[in-house]
Image (cartoon, grey):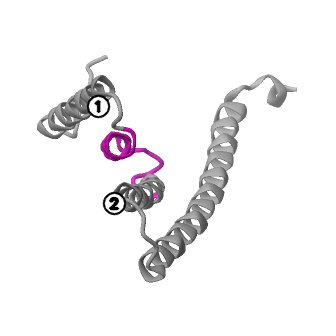
Amino acid sequence: MKRLTDPKPFKELIPKVLQMILNVGLTVLAFALCVMLIIEMVEFLKFIVGGEKREYKYFLAKILVFFLYFEFITMIVKYFKEDYHFPLRYFMYIGITAMLRLIIVEHDSAMDTLIFAAVILVLIIGYYIINITPRERPLRKS
């Protein structure tokens, strides 16, 4: 009877099960992103070799989409290497790349382009602040 009333096994089991589900999901996502990265690379090579005349914006957009896949895969790898933790700086890299892609592809409105540039500036300032703060936090006194 004592075993049913003791919540300690459940407190230890539930996070482990959820962590395992998260790890499996991220692994499946990483493989799917790898397949999509390979497909993007094949399309990119077809574009280069095919000799089709397209705008330079299409070429740059394809390169930036390729880097977005690459950055997401890198972020998942870092998640596993850094003991199940997503480094914030990788989200900032992805945000900057995504904003650059938007500026290149959708630059019809000057106000939108200015807002996208402001978002990039905010992300870069945030990245700078993250880099100047110490990585290790001081221990709290209880």
Residue 78 visible = no
Disc number placed over residue 56 in the picture, else none:
2
| SS type, badge 1 | helix
| SS type, badge 2 | helix
Few, some or many residues within 10 Å of mark 2 (<14, 14–19, 20+): few
Q: Which residues are magenta?
A: 80-106
Few, some or many residues within 10 Å of mark 1 (<14, 14–19, 20+): some
- The picture places residue 56, in percent across and down from the top left corner, at 34, 60
Residue farthest toward the front in the current orientation of the protein: 53
Instruction: Check residue 98 for magenta coloring.
Output: yes
Disc number placed over residue 113 in the picture, else none:
1
Point 62% across, 44% down: residue: 19
Q: Magenta stretch: dominant SS?
A: helix
- The picture places residue 131, in percent across and down from the top left corner, at 16, 40
From mark 1 to mark 2, how far is it between C-alphas?
18 Å
Quick one: 80 or 72, which is closer to the camera? 72
- The picture places residue 3, in percent across and down from the top left corner, at 81, 31
Instruction: Check residue 24 for magenta coloring.
Output: no
The kind of residue tagged 1 is Thr
Q: Which picture quadrant has residue 31?
A: bottom right
Left or right side of 38 for 1 = right
Point 72% across, 26% down: residue: 7
Query: Compared with residue 97, is residue 106 higher up or lower down, i.e. above or below?
Result: above
